[in-house]
Amino acid sequence: MWLDKIAHKLGLLRRKKANNTPYLAEYSLIILDSLMNKSDSLPVLLKAIKHYPEDTHNEGHVCDNMIAFMTTFSSFELLKQGVDQQFIEKGGRKAMQSQQQSMEKLESWYE
């Protein structure tokens, strides 16, 4: 038991991720982060997600994915932590910004 604590402090072991946190796709993560920056509570964020335009080829999967992820958190602050953790697991914000630019370029080809 005490060896686990030392190993965690030294970074040799990672904490186990909660099994009940749903998968959040990269595109959904980027959009959710953007909507969170414009919101200050879960109800305001949910309204923003429901009003997010879904006229792209994603056909509603983005909003469904964001809502499924969001509803697993009991507070806006915990959701922020969950989103930050997702960014870390997916290579960081800079990597995701690069991916967002690639996705926007790809979507512009569909128009």
Image (tube, grey):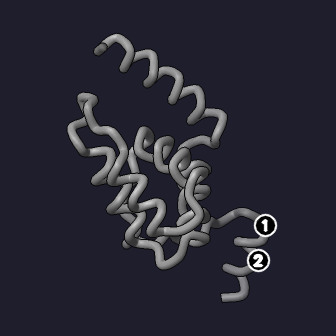
Give the CA separation, mark 2 to mark 1: 6 Å
Residue at image x 53%, y 71%? 16
> Exactly how many numbered labels are in the figure?
2
Q: Which residue is mark 1?
A: 10
Q: Secondary structure at mark 1?
A: helix
Residue 89 in view, yes or no: no
Q: Amino acid at mark 1?
A: Leu
Residue 69 image point, x, y percent: 39, 61
* Residue extending farthest left: 59
Residue at image x 70%, y 63%? 12
Q: Nearer the viewer, residue 56 or 5?
A: 56
* 32 with respect to 59 (left or right): right
**Which quarter of the figure has residue 91?**
top right
Residue at image x 58%, y 48%? 87
Residue 12 in view, yes or no: yes
Residue 64 image point, x, y percent: 28, 53
Residue 10 image point, x, y percent: 78, 66
Q: Amino acid at mark 2?
A: Ile
- Circles 2 and 1, Cβ within 8 Å, touching? The answer is yes
Q: Nearer the viewer, residue 91 or 37?
A: 37
**Which quarter of the figure has residue 61?**
top left
Q: Which residue is mark 2?
A: 6
From this view, report whether residue 40 is shown above or below residue 86.
below
From this view, report whether residue 38 is shown above or below residue 92.
below
From this view, report whether residue 61 is shown above or below residue 50.
above
Is disc 1 surrounded by few (<14), some (14 to 19) or many (20+) residues within 10 Å?
few
Is disc 2 surrounded by few (<14), some (14 to 19) or many (20+) residues within 10 Å?
few
Query: Where, quadrant-wise, is the N terminus in this rendering?
Result: bottom right
